[in-house]
Amino acid sequence: MLKITNLHASIEGTPILRGINLEVKPGEVHAIMGPNGSGKSTLASVLAGREEYEVTEGSVLFKGKDLLDLSPEDRAREGVFLAFQYPVEIPGVSSTNFLRTAVNQVREYRGQEPLDAVKFLSLMKEKMKLVEIDQKLLSRSLNEGFSGGEKKRNEIFQMAILEPTLSILDETDSGLDIDALKIVSNGVNELKSKDNATIVVTHYQRLLDYIVPDFVHVLYQGRIVKSGTKELALELEEKGYDWIKEEVAGTAV
Amino acid sequence: MSKDNEILEQFTSKEYEHGWSVEYEADEAPLGLNEGIIRWISAKKEEPQWLLDWRLKAYKTWEQMTEPEWANIHYPKIDFQRTRYYSAPKKSKKTDSLDEIDPELLKIYDRLGISLNEQKRLQGIAVDAVLDSVSVGTTFRDTLSKHGIIFCSFSEAVKEHPELIKKYLGSVVPISDNYYAALNSAVFSDGSFCYIPKGVRCPMELSTYFRINAANTGQFERTLIVAEESSYVSYLEGCTAPQRDENQLHAAVVEIYAAKNAEVKYSTVQNWFPGDKNGKGGIYNFVTKRGICAGDHSKISWTQVETGSAITWKYPSCILKGNYSIGEFYSVAVTNNYQQADTGTKMIHIGKNTRSRIVSKGISAGHSQNSYRGQVQVMKRATNARNFSQCDSLLMGSTCGAHTFPYIDISNSTAQVEHEATTSKIGEDQIFYCNQRGIATEDAVALIVNGYAKEVLNQLPMEFAVEAQKLLALTLEGSVG
Ligand SMILES: Nc1ncnc2c1ncn2[C@@H]1O[C@H](COP(=O)(O)OP(=O)(O)OP(=O)(O)O)[C@@H](O)[C@H]1O
Ligand SMILES: [Mg+2]
């Protein structure tokens, strides 16, 4: 579904990603871990199409299409979803209004009829249960004054509404309390199917107890320097990143 | 070019959609302004002597005044001798029945989406249609008159209700108030008059739709709204003009009188031709709007959505004379390309326990300049006056300007005056967030801008709010930065 080959990207002339290779197949869950500043959010942003990042080399295929060739909105319409590490606030625009606009633009792109108000509301109701989000929150301005945890929960709610094929969750667990972490993870698990895939970016093994990854990758200095199964996450939790950094330093010479 | 600028560029380069004009045989005054022209206009309208005298007095006053230069706007001097002060379609002779209006004129309004056919109209809005210098038709007059409400063109009001016009004309905006008010008083041609009797709640929205069609012609209309004790009316004003290379002057005067317990809501969606992308042409919109809350517990609320005009210069104001009276001003002013707007309000607290609220949202894009200018004045005997002002500016791109000029003038120590101001830019982050959910950039901007202006748009009657939202999006199309 997703094939990243030798991806290099820089921002304002500073190279951040330096040769990422990653393949994600339908039905899989990939976890990406790595020290702060290693390029995890950058990778997510490049996949979503943020234009500040310049792709200098490499390719990304999504469902056989050249992803890098599509505008950010078309990537979203093709089924790429990014749950932001820091969701932005949009004053005066309710989540409901925002999502209805989004859903209908996605539907239009896919040649489907727009949802009328009634149908959209019933879709909302259904998905609200999934992540146990409060109606009151959704009638407020999007993310404005939301707590950290409420913002994250709202991201997953949006994901539930938009039903993407590839979901990238950038540190969705940070800011969630213990109960919320369970609820949100359950939501993500329920949305999983054999046809879609998930990339979770996280610092903590805890999340991976709930959303169990098929593969774990370590991103360091803009490259995936180690890949493994879920046991790798346990090992990182225990030992930290120093041993990996040393390995990298060793091979670099 | 950064992404911001690119999007801004695209978003602000849409064309004005009401830029067409039609040909019709017109009854026109010769170009220029002198006493003879004023007599000509007055005779044309078969006016009584007192009104002609009033006009002539205004003309003398105007001649002695000088054009104001304090506003933050720049434009070549207007040549008042090269403007035409009266132009009316020949076939516009007012008839009692709407069926007799020249179909050609009806078509103009149909094309603007304003049907003058009562059956086709959405129930609940009565329209007075003003084309260049005259009113061509007023709908629902019969329905309204059953409630004792008078809603007609100004010219008819002069003939049919001279005592009311004599009493209120110039009572809120005196002849000598300012340069353009004096000019308007001398040459005004038509406009709307509405009168709501004591205790009557007007059962429908009243509206006037102004259209300038003729070239080289100024539009000088006069609107007068009188709300008697414990009455209520909501009034709407809309306007458009053809796309022309030369600038045209629109200098209107609106006066509102609210008696004890009366409430008047006045909403404007201003969409005069703003000039082209390079700043050529467009309407000069120099308007004086003022209401007086004459009685205790009366309320006047101005809501404006200003999207058009090359230059806007207007400050809808409230004189809060009655005790416990309330004045409100809600404004969204959008400027794009080379538009200039200097707009705001004046709240003059005279009575005790008077309250005012100002919410101003400026949006600037392109090379435009957008200024808020507001004055809150609390007079000596206005004990416990309160004002709250919120002035926000939203910038799109880096070549436009936003300015805030609040003046506060307090002569009573019990006054509570609060002023808040913010300036923000449409964030790339916000646009990207919308894009990532599948929303195209133009729609993202529309969403963000409408969210920003929501508090003001919420004040508009439903049907107008929807129109206004579309208009905001349209005005800014091509402009994100
Ligand atoms: N505009 C910029 N100019 C220069 N460097 C930048 C810019 N934006 C981001 N960076 C750098 O790129 C690197 C990667 O950042 P990124 O946000 O991808 O890290 P991350 O792996 O997500 O970290 P975290 O775990 O803290 O979220 C960081 O060193 C960051 O400082
Ligand atoms: Mg990050």
Image: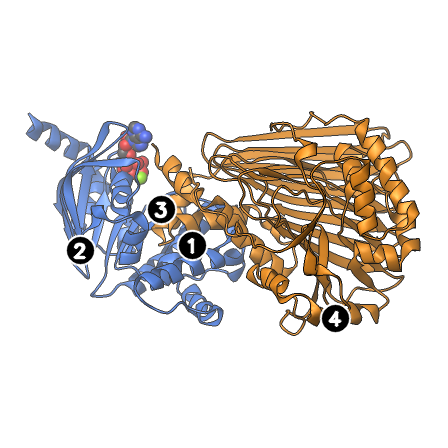
Marks 2, 3 in one chain: yes
Q: Is residue B153 left or right of residue B14?
A: right
| Chain of the residue where label 4 is placed in the rendered structure | B
Front: mark 4 or 2: 4
Residue A84: mark in rendering: 3
**Badge 1, how many Cα within 10 Å: few under 14, some, many 20+?**
many
Q: Where does label 1 land, which residue? A: A154
Work out whether residue B436 or residue A183 is closer to the camera in this orientation and state it: B436
Q: Where does label 2 land, which residue? A: A214
Which of the 4 image quarters holds residue A46?
A: top left
Give the alpha-carbon distance from disc 1 to disc 3, as whole Å. Answer: 10 Å
User: Chain A colour?
Assistant: blue
Front: mark 1 or 2: 1
Q: Is residue B130 left or right of residue B463?
A: right
In the picture, the quarter occupied by the N terminus of chain B is top left
Residue A183 lies, with reference to residue B476, above or below; the image says below
Residue type at mark 2?
Asp
